[in-house]
Amino acid sequence: MNVRQKGANGELEAAKWLHKWLRLKEIPQRNLEQVRSGGHDLTGVGKLAVEVKRCEKLAHSMWWDQVCRECPKNMLPVVMYRQNKKKWKFLISAQTIGIEIGYIELDMEVFIRWARGRL
């Protein structure tokens, strides 16, 4: 499978996961305009700007910089990532816990509780 197809499949998988676990009315959609105009990977997740990563090699800082650059001012940046045969993990702003810069990593259960409180 090529990298582009793996990314698209990861975005579709993430959209279904978010729909189910965040109890969204509709399945989030892939942002197909982001190649031309920038932005995050999924739309329809309330005020969460979700960037999806589906890869083996982790690059948290690079991913976090990307989502922060592309995140509109009125939204909250989120990186949702998964390695093969592992569960989804999430990066959110460290400001959530009172630290001015950086990110923190959440597992699925904690992310669900955090995200539901922001939708």
Image (tube, grey):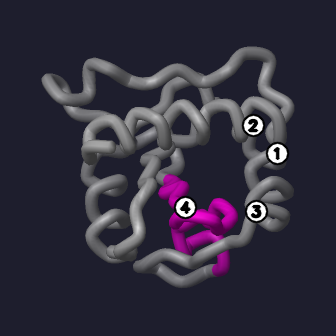
* Residue receiving disc 2: 119
Q: CA distance from mark 1 to mark 2?
A: 5 Å
Q: Nearer the viewer, mark 1 or mark 3?
A: 3
| Residue furthest out toward the top | 26
Query: For residue 55, what is the image quadrant?
Result: bottom left
CB contact under 8 Å: marks 3 and 2: no
* Residue receiving disc 1: 116
Tell me which amino acid carries mark 1: Arg
CB contact under 8 Å: marks 1 and 2: yes
Which numbered tag is attached to residue 108?
3
First in sequence: mark 3 vs mark 2: 3
CB contact under 8 Å: marks 1 and 3: no
* Residue receiving disc 4: 82
Tell me which amino acid carries mark 4: Arg
CB contact under 8 Å: marks 1 and 4: no
The magenta stretch spans which residues? 78-97
Q: CA distance from mark 2 to mark 4?
A: 22 Å
